[in-house]
Image (cartoon, rainbow, N blue to C red):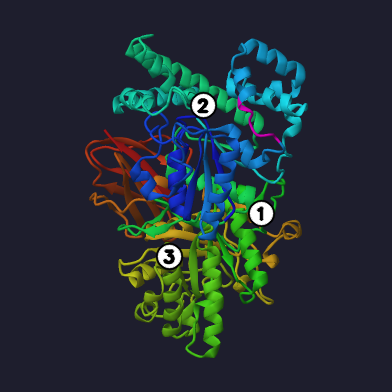
């Protein structure tokens, strides 16, 4: 419940982000705006609408009449009271606004500045501005350099303090809090100016002139502070006949642009802010950026993601379709690559998005929770998400021991369900092979779903069992999959049935899990880096080649996989000594896995196709041992194809729309694909893979 500070110039869009953020984390907004405190000044201050105030509770809005004075001391007192009230109700205070001096009061305090002296203030107000600035420069050169020299109120107050105390105004300031920071929002000048113009036009359309006329009857002209508000002073001058309405509207736009520029300059000089651009992204997307930033700044831990599954059985993370690509186990939390790049940054840069974390070779404990916290924090900083293995917590027995397990399960779920680095839960590992009673897992999964309805449970089975025996576990999860590691000596020993000993086992088991899912759940497969069948004593260490890993990856996708994990990058016995010192198999990553991830990851031209349903286009292949799938993204068509067996053959694809005249083979250095009358031919070598991309006219 640490307070969050959101600052920025007028019209930048900070209020919309604050609303979204408050709704996501259970927060309330404390306005840091020197004009929104006045009742009746609604349109000209862009005060939150009644509907917005109903969505999220706001504080320090409409607190005084125009006949009353209001200053930073009053603001600080009311803001602190609002903050305490919000925290007492278990919510998060979000300070949001553009009045820099009020932010300074919040973060610095007001020091020992004396209360105002009405007689002295009147004398200073009657003094020409150039004389006031000259006196301030002479008596307090430090503050003179910092103050907004075009703001009479700030200059007068500074001189008032000097004359009343005999000390420079800068000497009255409290010490800056070295642990407090916030987030600043900005836009490109062109974008911000356009928004300012739109806002000003909208204010006049909504009735700013009529509102000003009404406020003049309530003391607006007599309130020097309120008369400084942009728009109102210019409208008052218009009402006095000093300029026409179109001239007034244009002047308000000019003054607002100038004010926004001064605000930005002030915030950059006076506050420590982490800046986020609002140029392109919407408030919901910005909230995710805030999550990672706050995590770094203040350890904030309540901006969780939401992961769902759409009708096409595609995973959706925070409203955006994704193809999960992760690793079991990932590199160390503070790991580095051989060239000293941050390990998680390297995985993300290749296009990966998930890490399989959680308990592994030990039960959940305070130490494991602390380790998971460090993984979640690091994942959030690099735009990754964690698939958290619940291990023994998935089995909740009906005995006394089950109560202890349930208590720990609830603690773990509540600890991480709202973390920005969290993505999904991994349920029991290979439960059908382990003969874990389904009813125990149902108790565990029901608790997880009760506490966290916003993230799926992923269940990974061993390459064992029948479709029927595996399906009995489906109610305990939201997505299913299997691990299959066919590269071994002899080949295929991971599959006890041994009907196929080739790497095309991956396709067999992906289809098997698609049958288990029965169209009701997505399939998330686990593929091989290394495993115990190749690293235990007496076993021969063999690992997939680039061609083998690429084939297995595409075969899983072609047969229906909607997510992939790669297992064994952390197994020390499969590493070189130099990799072992770094805690992960970077040699395999650089030579094999990174090239594969770059083809299917978030930065790949193929990635959008991985997020779509299979196409209904009547495309056919002439060879029976070619597995393929067709995806459409708008007018673009993608065909992913692989050859199951050995040997080389030429195959034909037919049934493409007549509007397709040509295409390309992705990830290969060869000429443009020639398509005539809706068909084309190509050669496939042993376990070959081709990815075709064409566009309809």
- Regarding mark 2 in the picture, which secondary structure is present there? loop
Figure quadrant of the N terminus: bottom right
Labelled pair 2, 3 in contact (Cβ < 8 Å): no
Provide the residue designation for mark 3: 456
Q: Is residue 586 magenta?
A: no
Q: Where's residue 164, x and y in %?
A: 72, 27
Q: Residue furthest front?
A: 119
| Residue hosting label 1 | 586
Which residue: 48% across, 20% down? 257
- Most extreme residue toward the bottom is 399
Residue 152 coordinates in the image, percent (x, y): 59, 20
Prevailing SS of the magenta stretch:
loop
Task: Mark 3: give few (<14), some (14-19) or many (20+) Cα within 10 Å.
Answer: many
Tell me the distance, in whole angstroms, between the alpha carbons under discs 1 and 2.
63 Å
The residue singled out by tag 2 in the image is 225
Badge 1 marks a residue whose secondary structure is helix
- Of the two numbered discs 1 and 2 in the rendering, the one whose residue sits closer to the viewer: 2
Q: CA distance from mark 2 to mark 3?
A: 54 Å
Q: Is residue 667 visible?
A: no
Q: Nearer the viewer, residue 547 or 434?
A: 434
Q: Is residue 183 left or right of residue 132?
A: left
In percent of width and height, residue 286 lies at 48, 42
- Magenta residues, start to end: 113-118
Between circles 3 and 1, the one closer to the viewer is: 3
Report if residue 117 lies within the magenta region.
yes
Quarter location, residue 126 = top right
Q: Residues within 10 Å of mark 1 (few under 14, many from 20)?
A: many
Residue at 46% x, 38% y is 64
Taking the image as shown, residue 125 lies to the left or right of residue 111, namely: left
**x then y, percent, for residue 499:** 43, 75
């Amino acid at each position: 419940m640490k307070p969050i500070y959101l600052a920025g110039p007028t019209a930048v869009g900070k209020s919309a982000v604050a609303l979204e953020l408050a709704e996501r984390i259970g927060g309330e907004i404390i306005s840091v705006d020197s004009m929104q405190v006045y009742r009746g000044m609604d349109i000209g201050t862009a005060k939150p609408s009644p509907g917005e105030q109903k969505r999220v509770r706001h504080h320090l809005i409409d607190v005084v009449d125009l006949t009353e004075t209001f200053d930073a001391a009053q603001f600080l007192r009311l803001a602190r009271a609002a903050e305490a009230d919000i925290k007492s109700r278990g919510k998060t205070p979000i300070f949001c606004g553009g009045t820099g001096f009020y932010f300074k009061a919040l973060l610095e305090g007001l020091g020992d500045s004396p209360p105002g002296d009405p007689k002295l203030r009147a004398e200073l107000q009657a003094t020409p501005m150039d004389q006031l600035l000259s006196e301030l420069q002479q008596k307090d050169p430090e503050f003179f350099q910092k103050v907004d020299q075009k703001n009479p109120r700030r200059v007068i107050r500074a001189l008032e303090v000097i004359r009343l105390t005999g000390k420079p105004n800068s000497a009255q300031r409290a010490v800056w809090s070295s642990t407090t920071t916030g987030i600043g929002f900005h836009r490109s000048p062109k974008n911000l100016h356009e928004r300012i113009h739109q806002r000003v036009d909208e204010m006049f359309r909504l009735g700013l002139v009529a509102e000003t006329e009404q406020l003049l009857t309530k003391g607006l002209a007599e309130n020097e502070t309120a008369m400084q508000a942009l728009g109102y002073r210019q409208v008052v001058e218009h009402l006095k006949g000093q300029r026409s309405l179109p001239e007034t509207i244009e002047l308000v736009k000019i003054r607002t642009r100038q004010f926004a520029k001064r605000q930005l300059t002030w915030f950059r000089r006076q506050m420590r802010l982490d800046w986020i651009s609002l140029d392109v992204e919407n408030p919901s997307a910005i909230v995710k950026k805030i999550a990672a930033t706050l995590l770094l700044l203040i350890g904030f831990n309540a901006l969780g993601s939401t992961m769902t599954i759409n009708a096409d059985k595609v995973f959706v993370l925070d409203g955006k379709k994704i193809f999960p690509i992760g690793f079991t186990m990932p590199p160390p939390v503070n790991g580095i690559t051989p060239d000293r790049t941050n390990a998680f940054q390297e995985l993300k840069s290749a296009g990966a998005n998930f890490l399989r974390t959680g308990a592994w070779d030990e039960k959940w404990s305070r130490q494991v929770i602390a380790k998971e916290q460090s993984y979640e924090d690091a994942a959030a900083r690099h735009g990754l998400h964690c698939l958290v293995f619940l291990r023994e917590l998935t089995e909740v027995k009906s005995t006394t021991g089950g109560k202890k397990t349930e208590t720990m399960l609830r603690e773990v779920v509540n600890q991480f369900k709202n973390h920005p680095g969290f993505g999904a839960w991994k349920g029991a590992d290979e439960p059908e092979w382990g003969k874990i009673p389904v009813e125990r897992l149902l108790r565990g999964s029901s608790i997880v779903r009760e506490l966290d309805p916003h993230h799926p449970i992923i269940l990974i089975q061993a390459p064992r069992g029948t479709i029927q025996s595996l399906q009995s576990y489906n109610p305990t999860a939201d997505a299913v999959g299997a691990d299959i590691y066919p590269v071994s000596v002899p080949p295929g020993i991971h599959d006890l049935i041994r009907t196929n000993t080739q790497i095309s086992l991956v396709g067999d088991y992906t289809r098997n899990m698609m049958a288990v899912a029965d169209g009701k759940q997505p399939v998330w497969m686990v593929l091989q880096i290394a495993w115990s069948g190749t690293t235990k004593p007496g076993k021969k260490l063999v690992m997939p080649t680039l061609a083998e890993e690429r084939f297995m990856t595409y075969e899983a996708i072609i047969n229906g996989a909607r997510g992939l994990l790669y297992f064994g990058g952390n197994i020390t016995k499969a590493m070189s000594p130099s990799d072992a010192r770094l805690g992960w198999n970077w040699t395999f990553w650089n030579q094999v896995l990174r090239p594969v991830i770059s083809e299917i990851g978030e930065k790949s031209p193929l990635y959008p196709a991985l997020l779509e349903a299979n196409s209904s286009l009547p495309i056919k292949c002439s060879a029976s041992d070619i597995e393929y799938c067709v995806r459409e993204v708008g007018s673009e068509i993608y065909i992913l194809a692989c050859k199951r067996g050995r040997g080389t053959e030429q195959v034909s694809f037919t049934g493409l729309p007549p509007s397709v005249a040509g295409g390309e083979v992705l990830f290969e250095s060869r000429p443009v694909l020639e398509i005539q009358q809706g068909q084309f031919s190509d050669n496939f070598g042993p376990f070959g893979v081709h990815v075709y991309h064409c566009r309809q006219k």
